[in-house]
Amino acid sequence: MKFSTVAVGLFTFWLAIVPPPSAAAVSFPAEYSGSYRLTVTVRNEFGSGLCANEAALTIVLQANGQLEWRIAELEAHLESPSNAPATCTIRPTGETNVIQGTHDGVSRYSVPSGHPSFPPITGSFDAESIHGEYTAGPSYIEFTLPVVSHRIAIEPDPSQGFDFHKSILEGRGFKLVMRDPHGREHLDFASLKLIVGSTDTTQHLLSRLMQGIVPFSEDSGDSRTRVVRILPDPQKLMRGHDVFAIPFNGDWRIELRLCDKGGTCFNTVYDKVWFGPFVDVPTPANVGDMRCGSPPADVLKMTTVTVGNNGIDAPKSAIYLGLVDAASGSLWTFYFDDFGDGTGRHAWWQGQVQPLIPEISLPSGALMQNPELLVVDNVAVPAGSGAPALRRTAFPAGLFRLAVAALDKDTGALRLVQQNVQMCSR
Protein backbone atom coordinates (compact mmCIF):
# COMPACT_ATOMS: atom_id res chain seq x y z
CA MET A 1 0.00 0.00 0.00
CA LYS A 2 1.40 3.39 -1.01
CA PHE A 3 0.79 6.54 0.99
CA SER A 4 -0.38 9.79 -0.53
CA THR A 5 1.86 12.77 -1.20
CA VAL A 6 0.06 14.47 1.71
CA ALA A 7 1.47 11.89 4.13
CA VAL A 8 4.91 12.18 2.54
CA GLY A 9 4.83 15.94 2.91
CA LEU A 10 3.72 15.74 6.52
CA PHE A 11 6.50 13.35 7.45
CA THR A 12 9.18 15.38 5.67
CA PHE A 13 7.88 18.62 7.19
CA TRP A 14 8.00 17.19 10.71
CA LEU A 15 11.51 15.84 10.16
CA ALA A 16 12.60 19.38 9.41
CA ILE A 17 10.91 21.18 12.29
CA VAL A 18 10.93 18.79 15.26
CA PRO A 19 13.61 20.10 17.67
CA PRO A 20 15.73 17.96 20.01
CA PRO A 21 14.26 17.29 23.47
CA SER A 22 14.68 20.09 25.99
CA ALA A 23 14.69 20.28 29.75
CA ALA A 24 11.52 20.54 31.83
CA ALA A 25 10.00 24.01 31.80
CA VAL A 26 10.46 26.44 34.70
CA SER A 27 7.96 29.19 35.46
CA PHE A 28 9.61 32.59 35.88
CA PRO A 29 10.28 34.42 38.05
CA ALA A 30 11.56 31.46 40.07
CA GLU A 31 12.97 31.87 43.57
CA TYR A 32 15.15 29.27 45.29
CA SER A 33 16.17 29.66 48.90
CA GLY A 34 18.12 27.72 51.51
CA SER A 35 21.74 27.51 52.59
CA TYR A 36 25.10 26.88 51.05
CA ARG A 37 28.03 25.08 52.66
CA LEU A 38 31.57 26.47 52.59
CA THR A 39 34.43 24.05 53.27
CA VAL A 40 38.06 25.19 53.54
CA THR A 41 41.12 22.94 53.63
CA VAL A 42 44.36 24.27 55.12
CA ARG A 43 47.85 22.71 55.25
CA ASN A 44 51.31 23.32 56.61
CA GLU A 45 54.40 21.17 57.11
CA PHE A 46 52.89 19.48 60.18
CA GLY A 47 49.63 18.44 58.58
CA SER A 48 46.26 19.63 57.32
CA GLY A 49 43.00 20.82 58.78
CA LEU A 50 39.46 21.36 57.56
CA CYS A 51 36.63 23.66 58.62
CA ALA A 52 33.08 24.20 57.36
CA ASN A 53 30.02 26.33 57.99
CA GLU A 54 26.69 27.14 56.36
CA ALA A 55 24.92 30.40 55.55
CA ALA A 56 21.83 31.62 53.73
CA LEU A 57 21.62 31.79 49.93
CA THR A 58 18.71 32.94 47.77
CA ILE A 59 18.72 32.85 43.96
CA VAL A 60 16.01 34.49 41.85
CA LEU A 61 15.72 33.75 38.11
CA GLN A 62 13.86 36.34 36.05
CA ALA A 63 12.03 35.73 32.77
CA ASN A 64 14.48 37.95 30.84
CA GLY A 65 17.44 35.66 31.55
CA GLN A 66 18.79 37.72 34.46
CA LEU A 67 19.67 36.19 37.81
CA GLU A 68 20.04 37.71 41.29
CA TRP A 69 22.26 35.93 43.81
CA ARG A 70 21.85 37.00 47.47
CA ILE A 71 24.45 35.33 49.65
CA ALA A 72 25.19 35.74 53.35
CA GLU A 73 28.93 36.24 53.60
CA LEU A 74 31.18 33.78 55.42
CA GLU A 75 34.77 34.54 56.34
CA ALA A 76 37.51 31.98 56.90
CA HIS A 77 40.16 32.57 59.56
CA LEU A 78 43.32 30.49 59.06
CA GLU A 79 45.90 29.61 61.69
CA SER A 80 49.25 27.95 61.07
CA PRO A 81 51.03 27.20 64.38
CA SER A 82 54.80 26.82 64.29
CA ASN A 83 54.73 23.27 65.64
CA ALA A 84 51.25 21.88 64.86
CA PRO A 85 48.96 21.22 61.87
CA ALA A 86 47.14 24.18 60.34
CA THR A 87 43.60 24.94 61.54
CA CYS A 88 40.80 27.25 60.48
CA THR A 89 37.39 28.56 61.51
CA ILE A 90 34.58 29.98 59.39
CA ARG A 91 32.29 32.69 60.78
CA PRO A 92 29.50 34.83 59.30
CA THR A 93 30.38 38.47 58.74
CA GLY A 94 26.81 39.73 59.00
CA GLU A 95 26.96 41.08 55.43
CA THR A 96 24.82 40.00 52.49
CA ASN A 97 26.25 40.28 48.99
CA VAL A 98 24.01 40.72 45.94
CA ILE A 99 25.50 39.55 42.63
CA GLN A 100 23.92 39.72 39.17
CA GLY A 101 24.21 36.74 36.85
CA THR A 102 22.45 35.16 33.87
CA HIS A 103 20.61 31.96 32.96
CA ASP A 104 19.60 30.30 29.67
CA GLY A 105 15.90 29.97 30.50
CA VAL A 106 16.16 26.18 30.36
CA SER A 107 18.56 24.57 32.83
CA ARG A 108 21.91 26.40 33.24
CA TYR A 109 23.08 29.56 34.99
CA SER A 110 26.29 31.57 35.47
CA VAL A 111 27.36 33.98 38.22
CA PRO A 112 30.62 35.98 38.28
CA SER A 113 33.03 34.72 40.93
CA GLY A 114 34.06 38.26 41.87
CA HIS A 115 37.75 37.53 41.34
CA PRO A 116 39.51 37.95 37.97
CA SER A 117 41.63 34.84 38.53
CA PHE A 118 38.68 32.48 38.99
CA PRO A 119 36.03 31.37 36.45
CA PRO A 120 32.35 32.10 36.98
CA ILE A 121 30.17 29.95 39.21
CA THR A 122 27.94 27.75 37.04
CA GLY A 123 25.31 25.12 37.77
CA SER A 124 21.93 23.69 36.86
CA PHE A 125 18.30 24.28 37.80
CA ASP A 126 14.86 22.82 37.16
CA ALA A 127 11.33 23.39 38.39
CA GLU A 128 12.14 21.89 41.80
CA SER A 129 15.63 23.03 42.78
CA ILE A 130 18.88 24.74 41.80
CA HIS A 131 22.32 23.17 42.25
CA GLY A 132 25.90 24.34 42.41
CA GLU A 133 29.46 23.27 43.24
CA TYR A 134 32.51 25.50 43.07
CA THR A 135 36.16 25.20 43.98
CA ALA A 136 38.43 28.22 44.38
CA GLY A 137 41.85 27.47 45.80
CA PRO A 138 41.36 25.80 49.22
CA SER A 139 37.64 26.72 49.33
CA TYR A 140 34.76 24.52 48.18
CA ILE A 141 31.12 25.65 47.96
CA GLU A 142 28.14 23.39 47.38
CA PHE A 143 24.37 23.80 47.59
CA THR A 144 20.99 22.48 46.51
CA LEU A 145 18.24 25.04 47.08
CA PRO A 146 14.53 24.15 46.81
CA VAL A 147 12.19 26.39 44.87
CA VAL A 148 10.06 28.59 47.16
CA SER A 149 8.21 30.73 44.62
CA HIS A 150 4.62 30.27 43.49
CA ARG A 151 4.09 27.33 41.21
CA ILE A 152 1.32 25.53 39.40
CA ALA A 153 2.33 22.59 37.24
CA ILE A 154 1.33 19.28 35.68
CA GLU A 155 3.56 16.31 36.48
CA PRO A 156 4.87 14.53 34.49
CA ASP A 157 5.50 17.48 32.18
CA PRO A 158 3.01 16.90 29.31
CA SER A 159 5.12 18.78 26.75
CA GLN A 160 8.31 16.74 27.27
CA GLY A 161 8.45 13.19 25.95
CA PHE A 162 5.67 10.71 26.62
CA ASP A 163 5.87 10.07 30.38
CA PHE A 164 2.63 12.03 30.86
CA HIS A 165 0.87 10.04 28.15
CA LYS A 166 2.05 6.65 29.39
CA SER A 167 1.21 7.50 33.01
CA ILE A 168 -2.41 8.15 32.01
CA LEU A 169 -2.65 5.10 29.74
CA GLU A 170 -1.19 2.88 32.47
CA GLY A 171 -3.88 4.10 34.90
CA ARG A 172 -1.53 6.16 37.11
CA GLY A 173 -3.00 9.49 36.02
CA PHE A 174 -1.12 12.74 36.51
CA LYS A 175 -0.47 15.30 39.25
CA LEU A 176 -1.57 18.91 39.56
CA VAL A 177 1.04 20.58 41.80
CA MET A 178 0.34 23.99 43.40
CA ARG A 179 2.77 25.84 45.65
CA ASP A 180 2.66 29.09 47.65
CA PRO A 181 5.71 30.29 49.62
CA HIS A 182 3.31 31.61 52.30
CA GLY A 183 1.73 28.18 52.76
CA ARG A 184 -0.78 26.03 50.91
CA GLU A 185 -3.71 27.62 52.75
CA HIS A 186 -2.77 30.93 51.11
CA LEU A 187 -3.70 29.56 47.67
CA ASP A 188 -7.02 30.76 46.24
CA PHE A 189 -8.41 27.67 44.54
CA ALA A 190 -11.49 29.59 43.36
CA SER A 191 -9.18 31.40 40.94
CA LEU A 192 -7.96 28.23 39.18
CA LYS A 193 -8.12 28.38 35.38
CA LEU A 194 -7.40 25.72 32.76
CA ILE A 195 -7.03 27.09 29.21
CA VAL A 196 -6.76 24.58 26.35
CA GLY A 197 -5.95 26.26 23.05
CA SER A 198 -7.85 29.50 23.49
CA THR A 199 -10.81 27.94 25.34
CA ASP A 200 -11.42 28.15 29.08
CA THR A 201 -12.14 24.53 30.05
CA THR A 202 -11.99 25.05 33.83
CA GLN A 203 -15.63 24.19 34.45
CA HIS A 204 -15.33 21.06 32.32
CA LEU A 205 -12.40 19.89 34.49
CA LEU A 206 -14.06 20.79 37.80
CA SER A 207 -17.39 19.22 36.85
CA ARG A 208 -15.68 15.92 36.05
CA LEU A 209 -13.90 15.95 39.42
CA MET A 210 -16.64 17.34 41.67
CA GLN A 211 -19.33 15.06 40.23
CA GLY A 212 -17.13 12.02 40.84
CA ILE A 213 -16.90 11.15 37.16
CA VAL A 214 -13.10 11.22 37.20
CA PRO A 215 -11.47 10.00 40.44
CA PHE A 216 -8.87 12.13 42.17
CA SER A 217 -6.94 12.04 45.42
CA GLU A 218 -4.58 14.28 47.35
CA ASP A 219 -0.97 13.16 47.53
CA SER A 220 1.27 14.04 50.44
CA GLY A 221 2.93 17.41 49.87
CA ASP A 222 4.36 19.84 52.39
CA SER A 223 3.16 22.94 54.22
CA ARG A 224 3.61 25.05 51.07
CA THR A 225 2.42 22.54 48.47
CA ARG A 226 -0.85 20.92 47.51
CA VAL A 227 -0.68 17.94 45.15
CA VAL A 228 -3.83 16.57 43.53
CA ARG A 229 -3.56 13.31 41.57
CA ILE A 230 -6.17 13.04 38.80
CA LEU A 231 -6.94 9.48 37.68
CA PRO A 232 -8.87 9.29 34.40
CA ASP A 233 -9.80 5.79 33.24
CA PRO A 234 -7.72 5.05 30.10
CA GLN A 235 -10.69 3.24 28.52
CA LYS A 236 -12.96 6.28 29.01
CA LEU A 237 -10.63 9.08 27.96
CA MET A 238 -12.94 10.37 25.21
CA ARG A 239 -16.10 9.15 26.89
CA GLY A 240 -16.33 11.42 29.90
CA HIS A 241 -12.79 11.18 31.28
CA ASP A 242 -11.14 13.66 28.91
CA VAL A 243 -10.47 16.36 31.50
CA PHE A 244 -8.80 18.60 28.88
CA ALA A 245 -11.81 18.58 26.51
CA ILE A 246 -9.79 18.43 23.29
CA PRO A 247 -11.99 18.50 20.15
CA PHE A 248 -9.54 16.72 17.79
CA ASN A 249 -6.12 15.05 17.76
CA GLY A 250 -2.98 17.15 17.47
CA ASP A 251 -0.71 19.48 19.43
CA TRP A 252 -2.42 21.72 21.98
CA ARG A 253 -1.37 24.66 24.13
CA ILE A 254 -2.32 24.13 27.79
CA GLU A 255 -2.16 26.95 30.33
CA LEU A 256 -2.75 26.76 34.07
CA ARG A 257 -3.50 29.92 36.07
CA LEU A 258 -3.86 30.43 39.83
CA CYS A 259 -3.76 33.29 42.33
CA ASP A 260 -3.08 33.48 46.05
CA LYS A 261 -5.30 35.19 48.60
CA GLY A 262 -3.05 38.24 48.51
CA GLY A 263 -3.86 38.80 44.83
CA THR A 264 -0.58 37.52 43.35
CA CYS A 265 -1.33 35.50 40.21
CA PHE A 266 0.95 33.07 38.39
CA ASN A 267 0.72 30.61 35.54
CA THR A 268 2.43 27.83 33.59
CA VAL A 269 2.15 27.34 29.84
CA TYR A 270 2.81 24.03 28.08
CA ASP A 271 3.20 24.34 24.32
CA LYS A 272 2.59 21.45 21.94
CA VAL A 273 0.99 18.93 24.27
CA TRP A 274 0.19 15.98 22.04
CA PHE A 275 -3.15 14.18 22.08
CA GLY A 276 -3.51 11.29 19.64
CA PRO A 277 -1.59 8.22 18.41
CA PHE A 278 2.12 8.15 19.26
CA VAL A 279 5.23 5.96 19.17
CA ASP A 280 7.90 6.28 21.84
CA VAL A 281 11.44 4.94 22.07
CA PRO A 282 12.37 6.95 25.16
CA THR A 283 16.13 7.47 25.35
CA PRO A 284 19.21 7.20 23.12
CA ALA A 285 20.47 4.35 25.31
CA ASN A 286 17.47 2.32 24.13
CA VAL A 287 18.58 2.34 20.48
CA GLY A 288 21.70 0.70 19.14
CA ASP A 289 23.11 -0.76 15.95
CA MET A 290 24.17 -4.23 17.04
CA ARG A 291 26.73 -4.34 14.23
CA CYS A 292 28.76 -2.26 16.71
CA GLY A 293 28.43 -4.97 19.35
CA SER A 294 30.49 -7.97 20.31
CA PRO A 295 29.59 -10.36 18.89
CA PRO A 296 28.11 -8.24 16.09
CA ALA A 297 24.58 -8.82 14.79
CA ASP A 298 22.89 -7.38 11.71
CA VAL A 299 20.04 -5.66 13.55
CA LEU A 300 19.07 -2.26 14.85
CA LYS A 301 17.86 -2.90 18.40
CA MET A 302 15.20 -0.76 20.10
CA THR A 303 14.00 -1.44 23.62
CA THR A 304 10.97 -0.26 25.59
CA VAL A 305 8.99 0.67 22.47
CA THR A 306 5.52 2.03 23.24
CA VAL A 307 2.61 2.63 20.87
CA GLY A 308 -0.45 4.34 22.31
CA ASN A 309 -3.24 6.86 21.90
CA ASN A 310 -4.14 9.39 24.61
CA GLY A 311 -6.45 11.29 22.25
CA ILE A 312 -9.54 10.66 20.15
CA ASP A 313 -10.16 7.28 18.48
CA ALA A 314 -7.91 6.75 15.46
CA PRO A 315 -9.25 3.61 13.72
CA LYS A 316 -6.97 4.21 10.72
CA SER A 317 -3.43 4.94 11.90
CA ALA A 318 -0.02 4.27 10.42
CA ILE A 319 3.39 3.76 12.02
CA TYR A 320 6.63 5.01 10.45
CA LEU A 321 10.23 4.06 11.14
CA GLY A 322 12.99 6.09 9.51
CA LEU A 323 16.69 6.96 9.64
CA VAL A 324 17.93 10.39 8.56
CA ASP A 325 21.57 10.98 7.66
CA ALA A 326 22.70 13.66 10.13
CA ALA A 327 25.07 15.22 7.58
CA SER A 328 23.16 15.09 4.28
CA GLY A 329 19.55 14.83 5.48
CA SER A 330 18.98 11.79 3.25
CA LEU A 331 15.97 9.81 4.49
CA TRP A 332 15.53 6.05 4.64
CA THR A 333 12.31 4.35 5.79
CA PHE A 334 11.83 0.72 6.75
CA TYR A 335 8.91 -1.09 5.11
CA PHE A 336 7.90 -4.11 2.99
CA ASP A 337 8.06 -3.86 -0.80
CA ASP A 338 8.67 -5.77 -4.04
CA PHE A 339 12.34 -6.43 -4.86
CA GLY A 340 11.62 -6.77 -8.58
CA ASP A 341 12.84 -10.37 -8.79
CA GLY A 342 9.68 -12.12 -7.75
CA THR A 343 10.39 -11.63 -4.03
CA GLY A 344 9.53 -9.00 -1.50
CA ARG A 345 10.71 -8.22 2.00
CA HIS A 346 11.25 -5.57 4.63
CA ALA A 347 14.23 -3.31 3.96
CA TRP A 348 15.55 0.22 4.38
CA TRP A 349 14.54 2.17 1.26
CA GLN A 350 16.31 5.46 0.52
CA GLY A 351 14.33 8.51 -0.56
CA GLN A 352 10.94 6.87 0.06
CA VAL A 353 8.41 7.71 2.77
CA GLN A 354 6.36 4.60 3.39
CA PRO A 355 4.92 3.20 6.65
CA LEU A 356 6.28 0.23 8.55
CA ILE A 357 2.66 -0.56 9.50
CA PRO A 358 0.34 0.82 6.79
CA GLU A 359 -2.81 0.63 8.86
CA ILE A 360 -3.53 -0.12 12.52
CA SER A 361 -6.52 0.71 14.72
CA LEU A 362 -5.53 2.82 17.74
CA PRO A 363 -8.66 3.59 19.76
CA SER A 364 -8.53 6.12 22.56
CA GLY A 365 -6.76 4.57 25.55
CA ALA A 366 -4.77 2.10 23.45
CA LEU A 367 -1.42 1.06 24.91
CA MET A 368 0.99 -1.50 23.43
CA GLN A 369 4.41 -1.94 25.02
CA ASN A 370 7.15 -3.99 23.40
CA PRO A 371 10.25 -4.65 25.52
CA GLU A 372 12.39 -5.19 22.42
CA LEU A 373 12.13 -4.55 18.69
CA LEU A 374 14.83 -5.84 16.30
CA VAL A 375 15.02 -4.47 12.74
CA VAL A 376 17.43 -5.92 10.18
CA ASP A 377 20.00 -3.40 8.92
CA ASN A 378 21.98 -5.53 6.46
CA VAL A 379 19.29 -5.05 3.80
CA ALA A 380 19.05 -1.55 2.33
CA VAL A 381 18.03 -0.30 -1.10
CA PRO A 382 19.73 2.94 -2.18
CA ALA A 383 17.84 5.28 -4.50
CA GLY A 384 18.40 4.60 -8.20
CA SER A 385 17.06 2.81 -11.26
CA GLY A 386 16.78 -0.86 -11.98
CA ALA A 387 15.43 -3.69 -9.88
CA PRO A 388 15.79 -3.16 -6.12
CA ALA A 389 17.30 -6.64 -5.82
CA LEU A 390 20.28 -5.44 -7.88
CA ARG A 391 20.79 -2.35 -5.67
CA ARG A 392 20.62 -4.24 -2.40
CA THR A 393 23.40 -3.45 0.11
CA ALA A 394 24.00 -3.18 3.84
CA PHE A 395 22.82 -0.02 5.54
CA PRO A 396 25.65 2.56 5.53
CA ALA A 397 27.66 3.51 8.62
CA GLY A 398 27.62 7.00 10.13
CA LEU A 399 25.65 9.26 12.44
CA PHE A 400 21.91 9.15 11.82
CA ARG A 401 18.72 10.31 13.49
CA LEU A 402 16.18 7.62 14.28
CA ALA A 403 12.71 8.96 13.45
CA VAL A 404 9.54 7.25 14.65
CA ALA A 405 6.05 8.56 13.96
CA ALA A 406 2.36 7.77 14.26
CA LEU A 407 -0.17 9.22 11.82
CA ASP A 408 -3.92 9.55 12.30
CA LYS A 409 -4.87 8.96 8.65
CA ASP A 410 -8.40 10.30 9.03
CA THR A 411 -7.30 13.74 10.27
CA GLY A 412 -3.64 13.99 9.16
CA ALA A 413 -2.47 14.53 12.76
CA LEU A 414 1.10 13.25 12.98
CA ARG A 415 3.53 13.03 15.89
CA LEU A 416 7.21 12.41 15.12
CA VAL A 417 10.18 12.19 17.49
CA GLN A 418 13.87 11.82 16.76
CA GLN A 419 17.10 10.83 18.47
CA ASN A 420 20.68 10.24 17.38
CA VAL A 421 21.99 6.76 16.65
CA GLN A 422 25.44 5.68 15.44
CA MET A 423 25.19 3.17 12.60
CA CYS A 424 28.10 0.80 11.99
CA SER A 425 29.47 -1.45 9.25
CA ARG A 426 30.90 -4.97 9.27
Image: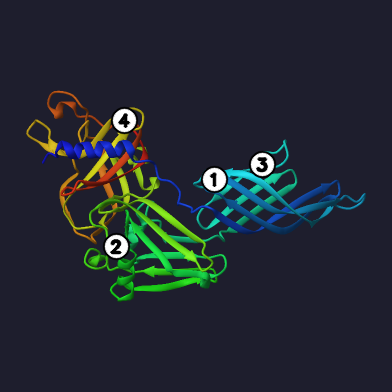
The first of marks 2 and 4 along the sequence is 2
Which residue in the structure is indicated by mark 3?
112
Q: Residue at x 13, y 37 (%)?
A: 337
Regarding mark 4 in the picture, which secondary structure is present there? Answer: loop
| Closer to us: 346 or 354 | 354
Report which residue position mark 1 lands on: 108
**Rounded to the nearest whole Å, what is the CA distance between mark 2 and mark 1?**
33 Å
Q: Are marks 2 and 1 in contact (CB under 8 Å)?
A: no
Q: At which x and y percent is residue 24?
A: 45, 52
Of circles 4 and 3, the one toward us is 3
Residue in view at x 35 percent, y 32 percent: 326
Quick check: marks 1 and 4 in contact, CB under 8 Å? no
Say if 397 sits above or below 80 in the image. Answer: above
Secondary structure, mark 2, is helix
> Which residue is labeled 4 in the image?
329
Dot 3, crowdedness within 10 Å: few (<14), some or many (≥20)?
some
10 Å crowding of disc 2: few (<14), some (14-19), many (20+): many
Q: Earlier in the sequence, mark 1 or mark 4?
A: 1
Please state which amino acid type lies under the numbered disc 3: Pro
Q: CA distance from mark 4 to mark 3?
A: 41 Å
Residue 418 visible somewhere in the drawing: yes
Q: Which residue is mark 2?
A: 169
Q: Quadrant of residue 144?
A: bottom right
Spatial CA distance of label 3 from label 1 is 14 Å
Residue farthest to the top, as pictured: 385
